[in-house]
Image (cartoon, coloured by chain):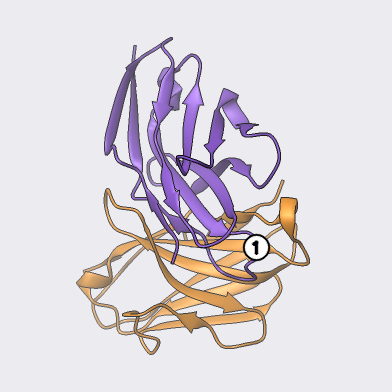
Amino acid sequence: AQSVAQPEDQVNVAEGNPLTVKCTYSVSGNPYLFWYVQYPNRGLQFLLKYITGDNLVKGSYGFEAEFNKSQTSFHLKKPSALVSDSALYFCAVRVLNSGNTPLVFGKGTRLSVIA
Amino acid sequence: GAVVSQHPSWVICKSGTSVKIECRSLDFQATTMFWYRQFPKQSLMLMATSNEGSKATYEQGVEKDKFLINHASLTLSTLTVTSAHPEDSSFYICSARRAGTSGREDTQYFGPGTRLTVL
């Protein structure tokens, strides 16, 4: 079975400071990892994904995430937070080349960037 | 980019009535669509996986007779909440996976969601 853990319900950061949203995963094969962002009353917007290759993945809006196989982590990062980054962030995983299996989501982390 | 639409974006209905939610992939064909349900301040809960032209596969605990899913074409899937009750009030989100893709192109794209309120 595959699962995702986002240990923090809420992350608060001052505007201009770096931000990190944590994610760890558990799968029985090679992971296929995603980050999505959700704004109030909206669907999920794709930020970035990791399949293979470079462990540092760059995505939309200046976000990046680092895949760490030994720690089974895929933390989301941004060097300088903006107030507009305040939203709900979801990490998701599925096993690579696993057919039509859906994404499994973490419970989400609410990011609040304070001006 | 890949766009998924949902209609309606919100709906209010009386208890006992049925509500249909449409999910469309606007600029790509989707052999697989997924329906999720999200409660306030919670994560997405997968309800069912729908493949074009075949019956949907429901997750454990999801009533297939209550949540009817039809995936009649490569661009349209519908979720019908039958005999809705207040406990069915929720945010329903669909997702589509682009047909004929694998590896780097294999991404799920999400609709904007439909907020259902049952009075």
Q: Is residue A92 left or right of residue A21?
A: right
Q: Name the spot of residue A87 as percent of width and height, x first.
A: 39, 34
Query: Residue B82: which quarter of the image?
Result: bottom left
- State the hue of chain A: purple
> What residue lies at 29% left-to-right and 58% top-to-bottom?
B39
Q: Amino acid at mark 1?
A: Arg
Q: Is residue B83 above or below residue A70?
A: below
- Which residue sits at x=27%, y=66%? B89
Q: Nearer the viewer, residue B34 or A51?
A: A51
Is any atom of residue A33 visible in this view? Answer: yes
Q: Quadrant of the N terminus of chain A?
A: bottom left
Is B45 rendered above or below residue A24? below
In the rendered image, which quarter contains the C terminus of chain A? top left
**Rendered residue at 66%/80% (across/down):** B52
| Between B3 and B44, the one nearer to me in the picture | B44
Instruction: Say what secondary structure mark 1 lies in.
Output: strand
Residue A42 shows in the view: no
Q: Nearer the viewer, residue A31 or A91?
A: A31
Q: At which x and y percent is residue B97?
A: 65, 62
Residue carrying label 1: B97
Left or right, A2 with respect to B97, comes to left
Q: Residue furthest front?
A: A70
Q: Which residue is depicted at the point 62% across and 34% down?
A: A55
In the rendered image of this protein, does residue A19 appear above or below residue B33? above
Quarter where residue A38 is shown: top left
Chain B drawn in what color? orange
Residue B25: x and y in percent read 66, 62
Can you name the residue that lies furthest to the right here? B100
